[in-house]
Amino acid sequence: MAVDDKTGEVVGYVRWVMPSHLANAKEPVWPEAQVAEPSSEDRAEHERDFKNATNNGRVRGLRNDMMEFRSTPLEEVDAKINEGGPFLFLDYLAVSPKYQRQGAGALLLRDGLAVADANGLKSYTTASAAGVKLYQNQGFETVEVVTVDYSKFGGVEPVTDYFMIRQPQKYRT
């Protein structure tokens, strides 16, 4: 998470998922980015909360038919891409609207891309149209595009996801 030093406001957040061979390495790789395993009490509390919010694993109140309609094509492309792994997976990146288009996204990507480069790993993410240029500027290339038409669920326009991969760059110390 990035915080504005002057205001204390959250600027943005990034979450990377390391491949198991790095996450489980004897010598820690990028230890400041690793999250400790939850305690058994925390895990039990999460399981209770999950059971209370779901019916057979499906979130109550969510349009599960729409989620399945959306998820199926995305999961198929994701599975195909992951066959070419391992990847350092960029799972999530968000920048507060107040700080967008000021370099915050690139700064949030910097450490993860450096880890990927140092370890000769490809990076992989899925982007919305709003994020494509940011990722292209960091060396990502679009390898697949999936557009889902939500009109049968009341949507007014299709939603497009861009599957993007970045090859490792020569690591600079």
Image (cartoon, rainbow, N blue to C red):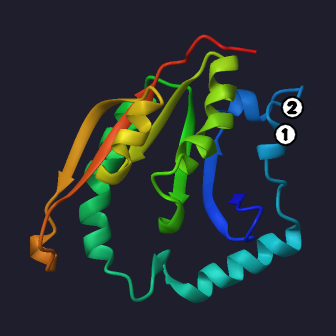
Q: Is residue 81 above or below residue 39?
A: above
**Outermost residue to the front:** 6
- Residue on which the image places disc 1: 31
At x 48%, y 57%, the residue is 100
Question: CA gap, disc 2 to disc 1?
Answer: 6 Å
The x and y percentages for residue 147 are 18, 51
Q: Is there a contact, CB below 8 Å, between mark 2 and mark 1?
A: yes
At x 70%, y 83%, the residue is 48
Q: Is residue 51 above or below residue 83?
A: below
Amino acid under label 2?
Answer: Pro
- Residue on which the image places disc 2: 28
Q: Nearer the viewer, residue 43 or 115?
A: 115
The x and y percentages for residue 152 are 10, 74
Occupied quadrant, residue 116: top right
Q: Quadrant of the N terminus?
A: bottom right
Q: Nearer the viewer, residue 169 or 11?
A: 11
